[in-house]
């Protein structure tokens, strides 16, 4: 399994190889959420994030592998820079892998055990407050078909949008970086989500990118009805940029998902971030000054 300590070691290794690393923000339990930056600092940025859902910790390792691929292949042309955020939910991942032992606060610990209904947290998805981070963003918040209104291992939307430290951290980081596109890795199903009510030109644009992602990965595009409050949803609705959720990993496997599938998943996605960023940046450059660029803002 790939845990939070392993991530910190990997980030340290990137840093020692001269790769820029930094911190997105802090989790509810004050753990750092690190990033690794690869590419050029020319203002055209992409954010690739994983492990927003605790039990999907394999996606953190997938994101690390994608970043490593770019570092090793520095000769590949890249028209901007990519912020890789492998583990958006470090508290949840630790809960999932280690149980409540690392939680210092006694009240929080007993609450977590009660909410979870026992000490086995392997299927936990939420953060250390029982908030599901991918329904805590301000995009039709609380209106989802599966939304829950009590602390839980999954689906609890929180008291209000951005009530969780992790979603606030990712929101603030995203607003500061101003990415032109974002990619979120989840597990499982081998599917791509790209819609959140876009219309006209933006819908046409985002569908075209989604089809290109589908062609590269081999995963089909899927329309999800009644799913709201996610990071991708917020990027599409509030930032008006193309944003995608990719569910990696074949559905025939159950959670906890087998790590033996890692190399297969990495192969399917290996050069996707760079290719997608280049496509988006080149489109924007082509439209600049034509008057059409305003349509995409
Ligand atoms: Zn997920």
Image (cartoon, rainbow, N blue to C red):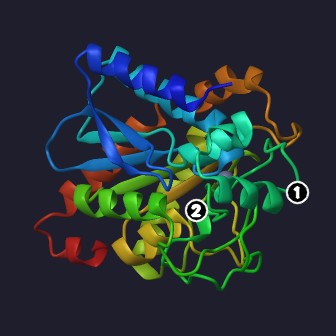
Q: Where does the image place residue 296, in percent across and percent down from the top left?
A: 30, 72
Work out which quarter of the rendered image holds the C terminus and state it: bottom left
Q: Where does the image place residue 12, in percent across and percent down from the top left?
A: 35, 21
167 with respect to 13 (left or right): right
SS for dot 1:
loop
Residue visible at 10% across and 67% down in the picture: 289
Q: Tell me, yes or no, if residue 178 can be seen here.
A: yes
Residue visible at 34% across and 48% down in the picture: 24
Q: Are marks 2 and 1 in contact (CB under 8 Å)?
A: no
> From the viewer's perspective, is residue 189 above or below residue 210?
above
> From the viewer's perspective, is residue 233 above or below residue 209?
below
Residue visible at 63% across and 65% down in the picture: 131
Q: Nearer the viewer, residue 152 or 281?
A: 152
Q: Nearer the viewer, residue 32 or 260?
A: 32
Q: Where does the image place residue 199, in percent across and percent down from the top left?
A: 47, 82
User: Rounded to the nearest whole Å, what is the CA distance between mark 2 and mark 1?
Assistant: 20 Å
Extreme front residue here?
A: 106
Q: Which is nearer the N-term, disc 2 or disc 1?
A: 1
Task: For label 2, count other residues whose C-alpha is less than 10 Å away and answer few (under 14), some (14-19) or many (20+).
Answer: many
> From the viewer's perspective, is residue 107 above or below residue 291?
above
Task: For label 1, count other residues whose C-alpha is less than 10 Å away and answer few (under 14), some (14-19) or many (20+).
Answer: few
Q: Where does the image place residue 19, in percent across and percent down from the top left?
A: 26, 23
Mark 2 C-beta closer than 8 Å to ligand 1: no
45 with respect to 56 (left or right): left
Q: Tell me, yes or no, if residue 275 can be seen here.
A: no
Q: Which mark is residue 133?
A: 2
SS for dot 2:
helix
Q: Which mark is residue 117?
A: 1
């Amino acid at each position: 399994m790939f845990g939070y300590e392993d991530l910190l070691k990997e980030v340290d290794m990137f840093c020692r190889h001269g790769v820029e690393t930094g911190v997105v923000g802090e989790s509810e339990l004050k753990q750092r959420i690190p990033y690794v930056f690869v590419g050029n600092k020319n203002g055209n940025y992409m954010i690739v994030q994983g492990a927003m859902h605790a039990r999907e910790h394999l996606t953190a390792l997938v994101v690390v592998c994608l970043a490593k691929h770019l570092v090793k292949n520095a000769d590949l042309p890249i028209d901007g820079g990519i912020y890789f955020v492998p583990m958006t939910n470090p508290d949840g991942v630790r809960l999932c892998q280690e149980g409540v032992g690392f939680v210092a606060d006694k009240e929080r610990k007993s609450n977590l055990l009660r909410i979870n209904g026992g000490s086995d947290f392997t299927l936990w998805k939420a953060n250390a407050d029982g908030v599901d981070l991918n329904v805590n963003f301000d995009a039709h918040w609380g209106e989802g078909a599966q939304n829950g209104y009590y602390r839980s291992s999954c689906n609890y939307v929180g008291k209000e949008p951005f009530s969780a430290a992790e979603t606030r951290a990712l929101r603030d980081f995203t607003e500061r970086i101003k990415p032109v596109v974002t990619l979120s890795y989840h597990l499982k199903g081998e599917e791509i989500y790209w819609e959140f009510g876009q219309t006209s030109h933006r819908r046409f644009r985002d569908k075209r990118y989604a089809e290109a992602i589908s062609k590269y990965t081999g995963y089909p595009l899927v329309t999800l009805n009644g799913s709201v409050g996610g990071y991708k949803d917020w990027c599409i609705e509030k930032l008006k940029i193309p944003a995608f959720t990719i569910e990696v990993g074949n559905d025939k496997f159950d959670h906890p998902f087998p790590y033996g599938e890692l190399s297969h998943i990495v192969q399917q996605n290996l050069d996707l971030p760079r290719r997608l960023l280049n496509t988006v940046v080149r489109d924007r450059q082509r439209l600049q000054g034509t008057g059409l660029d305003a349509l995409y803002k």
